[in-house]
Amino acid sequence: MSLEYKITKESLNEIEINLLGEVDIYTSPGLKDYIINLIDNRKNNIKINAENLEYIDSTGLGCLMAVYKKLNEYNLTMEIYNLKKNIYKLFDITGLNKVFDIKGNI
Amino acid sequence: MNKIKDDKIKLMIPKKSEYIATARITISSIGNLLGFNIEDIDDLKVIISEICIFFINHIKDNENPLEIEYFIKDKKIIVEVKDLNKHQYVEDTMSLDKSYNEMSILIIESLSDKYKIDMENKKINFEKYINSIDRC
């Protein structure tokens, strides 16, 4: 399974992106470029719907870190919600659950 | 289900990011066959990927493949990944790669029952046991 990502909601100051599939060493560079370009061009907060995210690895977590740092440059925020239990586990192991704003039942 | 044990599967994948999913799919299939629960199969997929990522990040040479051996035992799986490239492991102390590699090791350590990193011989192996409660 590869990765699909698309904007599902847009408001004046926020863009919601739905991730579908796997954010791994192969797909994460493309995702990182896509979101970072979006931030540079639109200067909006980012909300990530992870309901259909099936898998993430350390490079995927690194991609989210890069997005988080880019948002910080503009004083913008990122929210991640609907994470599956097996994926949240990796945020917990790496301590990134304390860095990112994670919402929803896990 | 028949007891499956003492079998071995060897997989050679090009040392390229697009083939790591192949190693993941293989371990998922073996884990399912052995009776690992869904959560442990997810762990196995993550561990094998992180080992491959570690080699890709640490040994830049990629002319030769990664050799992955899956040893199927009665109550556990042992997996060994070897980087067949000539270049030696170089510890990166400065770049962003270092934090990614630390993250990889942290994940491998947390999700496996036993692991060993042998960078002199460019191989990493790990073991994961089948939860006895799940096997009832």
Image (tube, coloured by chain):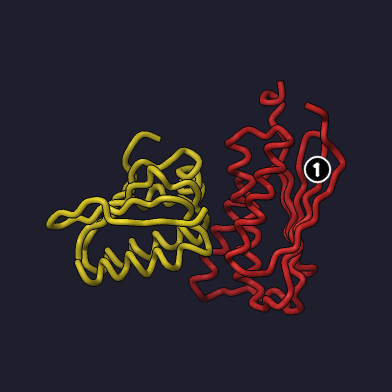
Q: Which chain is yellow?
A: A
Residue B119 to residue B108: above or below: below
One can see residue B93 in this view: yes
- Label 1 resides on the chain identified as B
One can see residue B118 in this view: no
Mark 1 is surrounded, within 10 Å at the Cα level, by few (under 14), some (14 to 19) or many (20 or more) other residues, namely: many
Report the residue at 74% width, 74% height from top: B64
**Quadrant of image for the N terminus of chain B:** top right
Residue B45: horizontal and vertical position, in percent? Answer: 61, 48
Residue A99 to residue B100: above or below: above
Report the residue at 27% width, 67% height from top: A38
Residue at the spot of label 1:
B72
Residue B96: horizontal and vertical position, in percent? Answer: 49, 71
Q: Name the side, left or right, on which A39 lies relative to A2.
A: left
Report the residue at 60% width, 56% height from top: B21
Chain B drawn colour = red
Q: Secondary structure at mark 1?
A: strand
Residue occupying the far right of the picture: B6
Report the residue at 67% width, 25% height from top: B134
Residue occupying the far top of the picture: B136
Type of the residue with mark 1: Ile
Q: Please name whichever residue, A29 or B111, is drawn nearer the observer in this view of the structure.
A: A29
Q: Name the side, left or right, on which B100 lies relative to B65.
A: left
Number of numbered tags placed on the structure image: 1
Say which quarter of the image contains residue B17: bottom right
